[in-house]
Structures are given as C-alpha cells and as structure tokens.
Image: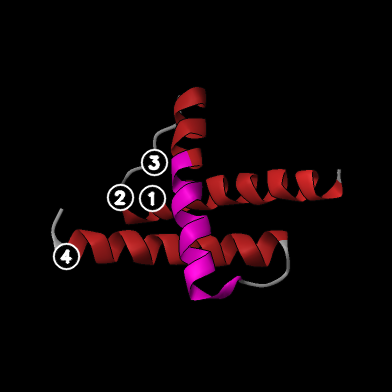
Amino acid sequence: MDITSIVIFLVVGAIAGWLAGVVMKGGGFGLVGDIVVGIVGAVIGGWLFGLFGITAGGLVGAIITAFVGACALLFVIRLIKKA
C-alpha cells in the first residue's frame, strides 16, 4: 500500500464518517472520530453489501459502502447506549 492509497483510504473514511454523523446524530465527531467511524463503517458496509450480493465500485462506491456501514454502526451504538 503506497502513500496515495493510504490518503485515499483516510479521506473516504473521513467523508463517510462525517456523512453518517450528520445523518444519524446531527453532527460530526471531529476529524479523527469521523475517520475511525468511516473506516469501521467501511468494513461493516463491505460485509453487509457482500451479504446481500451488492457491488459498488470506484471511489463513489467506496464512499457509499462506508457510509452505509457507518450508519449501521452508529445505529447499533445508539441502541446499546439506550439499553
């Protein structure tokens, strides 16, 4: 993995985490928090998309996959916090 791939990975994580924070909570979590939520969301989104047989390619597809996973992550965290 070269430096360009790492930067793209972090930017996709930041965008997806920020979008999920806005949609699910009403605001972001700061740069580092958005990146962490986006990266974990990308893993969850990739698993969910694979489970349903959905494929998303390219940069926009990666952002959408990470966004869906990050929203699912924040939804589960919200459920756990209420319990």
Looking at numbered disc 1 in the image, what kind of residue is underneath it? Ala
Give me the residue at 79% from left, 44% from top: 79
| Residue assigned mark 1 | 62
Give me the residue at 52% from left, 25% from top: 52
Q: Are marks 1 and 3 in contact (CB under 8 Å)?
A: yes
Name the dominant secondary structure of the magenta segment.
helix
Q: Residue furthest right?
A: 83
Q: Which mark is residue 3?
A: 4
23 with respect to 66 (left or right): right
| Residue assigned mark 3 | 56
Instruction: Calculate the distance from the C-alpha at mark 1 to the C-alpha at mark 4.
Output: 18 Å
Please identify, in this view, whether the residue under mark 2 or under mark 1 is nearer the observer: 1
Q: Are marks 2 and 3 in contact (CB under 8 Å)?
A: yes
Q: Nearer the viewer, residue 66 or 56?
A: 66
The residue segment tinted magenta is 29-43
Please identify, in this view, whether the residue under mark 4 or under mark 2 is nearer the observer: 4
Classed neighbour count for the residue bearing mark 4: other residues with Cα under 10 Å, few (<14), some (14–19), many (≥20): few
Q: Secondary structure at mark 4?
A: helix
Q: Secondary structure at mark 3?
A: loop
Give me the residue at 39% from left, 55% from top: 60
41 in the magenta segment? yes
Please identify, in this view, whether the residue under mark 1 or under mark 4 is nearer the observer: 4
Looking at numbered disc 4 in the image, what kind of residue is underneath it? Ile
Instruction: Calculate the distance from the C-alpha at mark 1 to the C-alpha at mark 3.
Output: 7 Å
Q: Secondary structure at mark 2?
A: helix
Looking at numbered disc 2 in the image, what kind of residue is underneath it? Gly
Q: Position of residue 54 (x, y in %)?
A: 45, 31
| Residue assigned mark 2 | 58
Q: Position of residue 78 (x, y in %)?
A: 76, 50
Instruction: Calculate the distance from the C-alpha at mark 3 to the C-alpha at mark 4.
Output: 23 Å
The colour scheme of the drawn protein is secondary structure
Q: Is residue 42 above or below residue 25?
A: above
